[in-house]
Image (cartoon, rainbow, N blue to C red):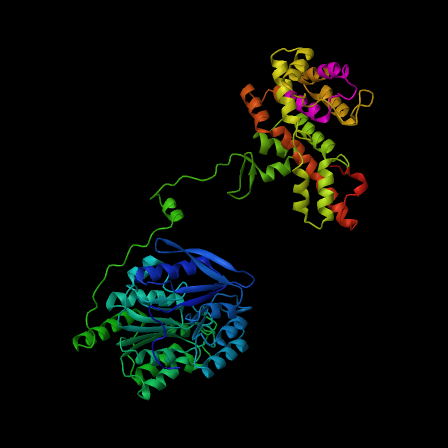
Amino acid sequence: MATGQIFSCSTQALFYNYKQLPIQRMLDFDFLCGRETPSVAGIINPGSEGFQKLFFGQEEIAIPVHSAIEAACAAHPTADVFINFASFRSAAASSMAALKQQTIRVVAIIAEGVPEADTKQLIAYARANNKVLIGPATVGGIQAGAFKIGDTAGTIDNIIQCKLYRPGSVGFVSKSGGMSNEMYNTIARVTDGIYEGIAIGGDVFPGSTLSDHVLRFNNIPQVKMMVVLGELGGRDEYSLVDALKQGKVNKPVVAWVSGTCARLFKSEVQFGHAGAKSGGEMESAQAKNQALKEAGAVVPTSYEAFEASIKETFDKLVEEGKIMPVKEVTPPQIPEDLNTAIKSGKVRAPTHIISTISDDRGEEPSYGGVPMSTIIERGYGVGDVISLLWFKRSLPRYCTQFIETCIMLCADHGPCVSGAHNTIVTARAGKDLVSSLVSGLLTIGPRFGGAIDDAARYFKDAYDRSLTPYEFVEGMKKKGIRVPGIGHRIKRGDNRDKRVELLQKFARTYFPSVKYMEYAVQVETYTLSKANNLVLNVDGAIGSLFLDLLAGSGMFTKQEIDEIVDIGYLNGLFVLARSIGLIGHTFDQKRLKQPLYRHPWEDVLYTK
């Protein structure tokens, strides 16, 4: 491996398996460092393509999303780092695919638990093809003031505190990502900060070793000293011992191997990482620390003394003139996300939507303020749910039963009515359920099923103004308006609509008052004297009876009743009910595998 610097202020990466927060943290770090271009060139999300919106400073940018690694590499040939956030199940395959791309030089595998056999294959391929593999089980790495991988170094506040927005003089390498964050802080307190930091990962077989990176740091002129944090288990540290003994490292190395407390336990102890398990005396922290010390590394007596050793080594280099003071710079202010600022009380922002009927926050959704569990426990029906969501109150049981009765009676009226016909034709054209349903619903209007609101509106106005049926009907005739709710293409005075009779029977049995319905019946009596087909239809029956429901329940003001009628609540009842039948017709046609419908020409009058 050896060679030198692997990142720079122009390094760009491809991010595999979209994760919003790590990418945004990378972009925020870019802005903090004064980069001109974002470090994330593209995102690879198998099965997805398009763009993801993120922020680069105050500017919102669109980062391309690709469905395949090959396509992403072809689209972004300058992106040479592959950051793999895939799960341990698929991390190996996707990492190998990335390593095989000519444009990729560095692959970082975040997942832990990648099968060891797969990891060994990745390591062998990377070494054979002169590529850098960081991880598995890594948080990644960072070059101060230039580039960072994913969540490396944590929050922006920590990055600023550790002075990572500008380069220092220390090269740092560790197995642990969590301890890396701690050490960045420690190093910043007693030196001018790090130049580059790498967490190689805590699995048994890391893609690159501590010594790989120390030897690399040794070739980077800006790195004046190295800090190494190892841990018990494995023999990785001994490759560094050999490099020191062979004189391959000519810069000071301050090292500590954690895990000295393991000897206090009577049995073998498995620490956090898969590789943090001593397999014998040579793999103990004490043996490694002693070997490093004998090889020439600066090794403190304890982790607590680590900071002092780093400071002493740094100060000596400053005295010798090998390290010149770093000019401090003030990093730019990262714009705060709106949601974060609102939570902290720094800003206030208007909402874009108002909702008063339901709430999906908290442990469970609620309808009209009633928790979902309560709706189930109390045995509420569809009518009760409609009363909560439409009327924002729990209506009496007879009201919700009436609503349910209307839904049942209006669910369907055979295949010949316009709505069902449209749905059937659309379904037979091979369209999906939603398209078939909507084609039927679009026929609902003043001439088909959409007269309930108008019937209620005109009946209410006439009754409230004490108009006689004669005055009402003749007045509508003078205006050129047909009386909504009156008239039927098939039903007659001697063949009434059974649905109307059932609704009237229910209302007379349960409603405290049916004044509007009785007025509608009087109007029907008058219209039947003119023509036998001018009967009260189901629209008129529902419209007049809903007025009685609203007025008789005592739960609505006059203003609320007028508003309900004006908004179109009652037509909504027909739309809801008829959707059931239209869905049924769609399923029926598809189940019967009916072919494309073509209207017979003999049923068309062709004329000039």
Range shown magenta: 522-548
Residue shown at 50%/36% (left/top)?
355
The dominant secondary structure in magenta is helix
**Between 516 and 247, the one nearer to me in the picture:** 516
519 lies left or right of 9: right
Which sits in the foreground, 557 or 243? 557
Residue 505 belongs to magenta span? no
Q: Is residue 124 above or below residue 583?
A: below
Which residue is located at x 31 percent, y 60 percent? 32
Taking the spot 73% from the left edge, 19% from the top edge, the residue there is 508
Q: Nearer the viewer, residue 109 or 76?
A: 76
For the C terminus, the quadrant is top right
Image position of 454 (left or right of 208): right
Residue 336 coordinates in the image, percent (x, y) = 35, 51
Q: Is residue 543 magenta?
A: yes
Q: Is residue 23 visible?
A: yes
